[in-house]
Image (spheres, rainbow, N blue to C red):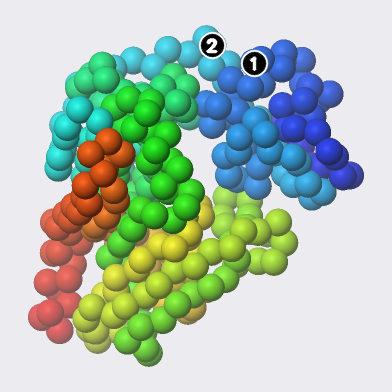
Amino acid sequence: MKIRVEEETNVRIDKYLTQFVEDSRSLIDKKIEAGLVTVNGEEVSTHYIPRVDDEIEISEVNPTQETIESEEMPLDIVYEDDDVIIINKPSGMVVHPGAGNFSGTLVNGLMHYTKDLSDVNGDIRPGIVHRIDKDTTGIMIVAKNNKAHEILSDALSRHEIKRDYIALLRGEFPSDTATVDAPIGRDPSNRKKMAVTSRNSKDAITHVRVIKRYKGYTLVRCSLETGRTHQIRVHMAYTGYPIVNDPLYGIGPSDSFGQFLHSTSIDFTHPMTKEHMHFEVDLPEHFKEFLNTLEEK
């Protein structure tokens, strides 16, 4: 169900939605917490105040009737202690269940691997502090208890967690370094996409540094100052140098591996020990193989 906000409202989204659906307010709250209610394509909290022209989408899935099953699957665990797990996510894996997709996700695998996962984000997103796109590969933090989760989420909101990505761009990027400071919101002409826009948008900043240039391509390292949906993919396309093999924002055909975008490193303060933590993972084989073909040209 989709609802467009036609006039200004000063009430929380859970109360606002009761006038449009038969669901109880508590059920609406559960859907919001489960990520089954989005505003302009992004998840929100129950405290969000709808604004004029917001597009609210509500999943028909009833989170109280869905059971998230644990599933045995290979997990590339980079590090683990009593409070956090560092995962190297492969391409093609959805991070957590959502409408119509309640199996085969990272959460299903984590639930089989351990019973120790935070429940700050409800039953559908246990342990998930932040996400990366289905076809984006690389490092993610998982919280094993609520205290660790809350501390990490707070650090994320204050931009104290440093996340770097490696991306292969189509075209020869002109500068050795650059900062893309351009607000991102829902693409008004395609609701499945995000775009640089001044309408219903949020500030978005990406720092770019060239690693290596190839004929017709550029390998870059991107540092996130903010964490908007599809941020690096949107910003690189906006500059005219989209990520190679990106089926949504790229140029030309793409294969099933998806965009050549890899979450390569993360730096953060451990939520309990207060130690500085740094983890870095290598590019996936398919990405490296493509770079090898560029070396030969």
Residue 288 versus residue 160: which sits nearer the camera?
Answer: 160
Residue at 73% in and 32% down = 13
* Quadrant housing residue 144: top left
Mark 2: secondary structure: loop
Q: Residue 192 carries which label?
A: none
Q: How many labels does the image show?
A: 2
Q: Position of residue 8 (x, y in %)?
A: 87, 45
Identify whether 109 is placed above or below 67.
below
Q: Which residue is tagged 1?
A: 27
Q: How far apart are marks 1 and 2 (CA)?
A: 8 Å
Identity of the residue furthest to the bottom in this view: 174
Q: Within 10 angstroms of label 1, few (less than 14), some, or many (20 or more) residues?
A: some
Q: Residue 209: x, y in percent?
A: 32, 78
Instruction: Using the image, determine if residue 77 lies above or below residue 188.
Output: above
In the depicted view, which residue is nearer to us: 287 or 161? 161
Q: What residue type is labelled 1?
A: Leu
Residue reaching furthest right? 7
Question: What amino acid is labelled 2 in the image?
Answer: Thr
**Residue at (72, 44) in percent of width and height:** 55
* Residue found at the far top of this picture: 65
Image point (81%, 42%), residue name: 5
Percent of width and height locating residue 28: 66, 21
Is residue 224 visible from the viewing direction of this image? yes
Q: In this view, does 206 lie above or below 279?
A: below
Pick the quarter of the image with the C terminus.
Answer: bottom left
Q: Which mark is residue 64?
A: 2
Q: Are marks 1 and 2 in contact (CB under 8 Å)?
A: yes
Residue 244 visible, this angle? no
Among the 4 quarters of the image, the one containing residue 271: top left
As helix, strand or loop, the secondary structure at mark 1 comes to helix
Left of 255 or right of it: where is 123? right
- In this image, 177 relative to 276: left or right? right
